[in-house]
Image (cartoon, rainbow, N blue to C red):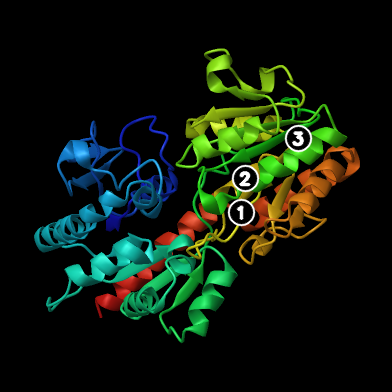
Amino acid sequence: MLVLTSTYPRWAEDREPRFVYDLSRRLARTFEVHVAAFHAPGAGLRERMDGMMVHRFQYFPQRLQELSYEGGVLEKIKRKPWALFQVPGFFAAQINLIRRPTAQIPFDAIHARWILPQGWCAVLAQTGRRFKVPILCTSPGGDLFGLRGPLFDALRRWVLQRLAAVTVVSRAMAERMASWGIRTPRHVLPMETDLTTLFTPTPETPRRRATILFVGRLVEKKGVRYLIDAFEDVRRRMPQAELWIVGSGPEETFLKKRASAVAPVRSRDSLPRNFRPSALHPHPGTITFFGSVAHKDLADFYRSATVTVVPSVAGRSGDQEGLGLVLVEAMECGCPVIASDLPAVRDVIRHGETGLLVPPEKVRLMADEITNALSTPHLLEKLSKNGSEWIRARLDWNQTAEKSKNLFLNLISKNSL
């Protein structure tokens, strides 16, 4: 199997999202897995990681590569418009990296993570070949909802119609594809995260009394600015409340400036070097920016916080969440969740039962829900219990990996007939 991705660990303990790596590692029990990913300084062009062969393509002189890692490609171009000139090399290098291995190794399947650009590159790379490797594409949401306009809609349809199958992370995404008349087999599967050994509840970890948590990239569609504005209202009503922001991204400087107008701001530099969230002393009325945190350390944040808030919005480009992993990870750790009422989020959150929903961008309503939750212990207990039970019953990691494996085996079986 050849896996195409723009999100993959560059080295051990890398803080890049691990969801592609986690599923690929599970699939490596059945398949010989090769991964095609972007190159980055300090990472090998070709190396074996945990039994998987990783091929990395260089699309520009090494020190000038701007499109990959530490944020999405579109966010990089917004911040540095000149990076747009790297896009042709980016596509050409990726297509070339797909063509070479598929010509040399008899792959049985291609797993393209994202419709654009990976799915598009996978289809183009096999143009003109008599025998084509079946492509299964996984869309997390941003590539489906973002990049508005007739040209991008046409590109998406062109790619989707040439795939053997597609998986999406929410019913809202499957319905969007159906409305376009796409007949390619669609399957709803959650994104991959370790709900067995890592993101699990630990009753011995004391849950804090008024700590609001955000986890995610600091980009427009995450809606962190609205959470910061809501916190201004929350701290007036509940002076003991504090806000933790975990993550980094292009909006970090802007958000810190906005936060400083709302409350005293603290940063990771002011914390003990090897701190544990559960052991930190409360700092009422403050906003703490923790920066990027190792994946393995996130669980302690979820176990310690009083509530996790997911204030996602639809970005100006149309980009929005497919189904964020933060929702799933927090709920499985027993942390109650307050989230924006977006179509994909409703797959997981039942208002008042498994979590709380707030209309996107409605600062006052968000502040109301946060304040109500923090001041109502029995509601927090109910959301914690129901949320974790719902996740365990429906989003078991082992089941997701098994379903993914069977999808690929079925595609390979059909293609060999």
Rounded to the nearest angstrom, the CA distance separating label 2 from label 3 is: 20 Å
Q: Secondary structure at mark 2?
A: helix
Which residue position holds label 2?
225
Q: Secondary structure at mark 3?
A: loop
Q: Horizontal placement of 26 versus 364: left or right?
A: left
Give the amino acid type for the residue marked by disc 1 in the picture: Ser
Which residue position holds label 3?
306
Mark 1 Cα shell of 10 Å, populated few (<14), some (14-19), many (≥20): many
Q: Horizontal placement of 41 versus 290: left or right?
A: left
Count of numbered circles on the image: 3
- Residue 345 on image: x %, y %: 64, 60
Observer-nearest of 95 and 253: 253
Give the amino acid type for the residue marked by disc 3 in the picture: Thr
Q: Are marks 1 and 3 in contact (CB under 8 Å)?
A: no
Can residue 200 be spotted in the picture? Answer: no
Point 43% across, 83% down: residue = 182
Q: Tell which circle, 2 or 3, labels the residue nearer the N-terminal end.
A: 2
Give the amino acid type for the residue marked by disc 2 in the picture: Arg
The label nearer to you, 1 versus 3, is 1
Q: Tell which circle, 1 or 3, labels the residue nearer the N-terminal end.
A: 3
Quadrant in the picture for the N terminus = bottom left
Name the disc covering residue 176, or none.
none
Q: Hey, which quadrant is residue 284 in on the image?
A: top right
Q: Secondary structure at mark 1?
A: loop
The label nearer to you, 2 versus 1, is 2
Q: Is residue 127 above or below residue 353?
A: below
Name the disc covering residue 312, or none.
1
Observer-nearest of 403 and 331: 331
- Residue 31 on image: x %, y %: 30, 54
